[in-house]
Image (cartoon, grey):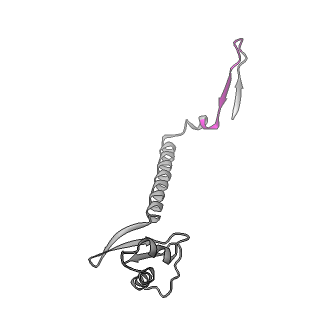
Amino acid sequence: MYVAYSNLNQPSRVTLQSSFDKQSSMNPKSKTLFRFLVVLVLFVFVFSFVALMQVNANNTVTVSEGKQSVQVIVQRGHTLWGIASENLPKGKSVRSYIAQIKKHNQLKSSYIQEGDVLLLP
């Protein structure tokens, strides 16, 4: 950036010009390429944001074998006990529901970690 001063008898004016002003005389191919890159970056940003929102969705309903199952994506701090307690059907104990969840998801232990996907019966 540089500053141009006027030596006229009028009140002094300061004009600021940036290097971008010099680039405004870019040829049409360069302008088209620049615009394409800006649109491409914006598209990738929006697509990534939407994909992350889909990944972080907590509960979705899926249909498997004619029965409805609730799909839970394990978040940080979730426990199998907590998930079972939140989704416990009426008339069932938490312990028996945990056993069903483990059997339905072929789990050998109650250990779950962030990002695991559980289907609740």
Residue in the image at 40% along x and 74% along y = 88
Q: How many marks?
A: 0
- Percent across and percent down for residue 95 are 45, 83
- Outermost residue, top side: 9
| 93 over 26 or under it: above or below | below
Compare residues 15 and 70 and report the one nearer the observer: 70
Q: Quadrant of residue 23?
A: top right
- Percent across and percent down for residue 55 are 46, 65
Residue in the image at 49% along x and 73% along y = 82
11 within the magenta span? yes
- Outermost residue, front side: 91
| 12 over 44 or under it: above or below | above
Give the side of residue 16 with respect to residue 60, left or right: right
110 within the magenta span? no
- Dividing the image into 4 quarters, which one contains the N terminus? top right
- Dividing the image into 4 quarters, which one contains the C terminus? bottom left
Compare residues 33 and 66 and report the one nearer the observer: 66
Give the side of residue 30 with respect to residue 63, left or right: right
| 53 over 18 or under it: above or below | below
- Percent across and percent down for residue 13 are 68, 20
- Percent across and percent down for residue 44 are 48, 56
- Outermost residue, bottom side: 108
Residue in the image at 51% along x and 69% along y = 75
Bounds of the magenta span? 8-20
